[in-house]
Amino acid sequence: MFDAAFLEAFHDSIHAASEIIIVVHEYPDLDAIGSALALDMAFSQQGFNSRIWVAEPLNHSFSFLPELTRVGKKLGNVSDTACIVFLDSSHKERVAQHALLDPILEHVVSINIDHHCDNSRFATFNCVQDVSSVGEMISILCSTLKWPITKDMATCLYAAICFDTGRFAYSNTRSQTMHVVAKLLDTGIDPNIIYQEMYENKTLSSFKLLKLALDNLIVCREAGYAYTQIPLSAPKGSFKLVDFIRQLKDIDVFVVIQAVNSHKVKVNLRSKKHFDVSAFANQFGGGGHVRASGLVFRDMPLDECVTTIIHALDTALAATAP
């Protein structure tokens, strides 16, 4: 997975760095945060000066992860001898407040570890692999470097892999994934407790959000898609709405279009079998995986975003129809 050239560049970069800053994509999920925490703990164990920068506040769904306080919201001063490590970020622009990094990246070494097929390989050194998750990649990286994986690291990595594989049910779950997970379980983590923290800790507000999403659900059986829209006035919650509605039978494409604030609308896309949602999202500046992708509209009203997405989806599905 990690070839000799990348491993040598990784080794030289982190040993030469006065500081290692780990960065993840905007609206970070458990794969991003779990992987970042595990890598940060690994760096710390090996005697490196490292930290995690996430410009946005994290919601309560991450609260069970060990060492979460190591995630900082302020980038602060960055030395020219620092090293920036990007995790789970297909493009530099996917990082929240990425403009702060632009002048820094002109002077520092950067490393990009990712599993998105549309990764632009924007860093000084890049490792992009077709695997389940960055959590799987960090697990293998630590094993390859013979860095011990502690129970706390394993909790973060297990949660990362579990999340991005849909509880080991998605097509990205392969034999290597399960071998990696088996080694994580050997550290003594309790998968039942992690599962409860990930999937059985929803607030009443989250259920109200889910109800609204279902009330607004539109199903187009002829074209094979379903979508819902979530206004800014919606209850706050941590349900992954698109993964809930994808349980609908005989539908291939699912879309959740949600107002984040007065200037931003987030779109989550999923498909089961046939449609490439990454290619679809790419036309709007988004991207991700063939079966799971996303994009963001800025300074466009929610209803206009809905019209734009659904018109484009109708056109794309008609073009791919047999």
Image (spheres, rainbow, N blue to C red):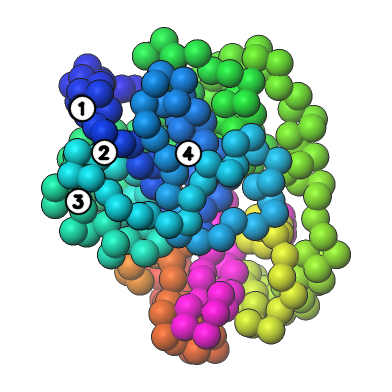
Element carrying mark 2? strand
Task: Give the image location of residue 116, x and y in percent.
Answer: 38, 45
Q: Earlier in the sequence, mark 2 or mark 4?
A: 4
Q: Nearer the viewer, mark 4 or mark 1?
A: 1
Which of the 4 image quarters holds residue 3? top left
Q: Select label 2 or label 4 by which is in front.
A: 2
Q: Identify the residue position indicated by label 1 in the image.
A: 16
Residue indicated by mark 4: 36
The residue drawn where x is 53% and y is 64% is 268
- Residue 265 among magenta residues: yes
Q: Amino acid at mark 2?
A: Cys
The residues tagged by marks 2 and 3 sit, at their Cα atoms, a distance apart of: 9 Å
Point 47% across, 38% down: residue? 36
Q: Name the foreground residue: 243 vs 37.
A: 37
Residue 195 versus residue 221 in the image, above or below: above
Residue lying at 49% horizontally and 50% vertically, measured from the top left: 72
Towards the viewer: 227 or 64? 64
Seen in the picture, residue 63 relative to 263 is either above or below; the reply is above
Residue 105 is tagged as: 3
Visible residue check, residue 174 = no
Occupied quadrant, residue 235: bottom right
| Residue 78 in picture, x, y percent from top left | 27, 49
Secondary structure at badge 4 equals helix
| Residue to which mark 2 is pinned | 83
Residue at 52% across / 36% down in the picture?
Answer: 37
Amino acid beneath label 4: Ala
- Measure how far apart labels 4 and 3 are at the Cα level: 19 Å
Between discs 4 and 1, the one toward the N terminus? 1
Q: Which residues are magenta?
A: 247-274
Position above or below: 142 against 256: above
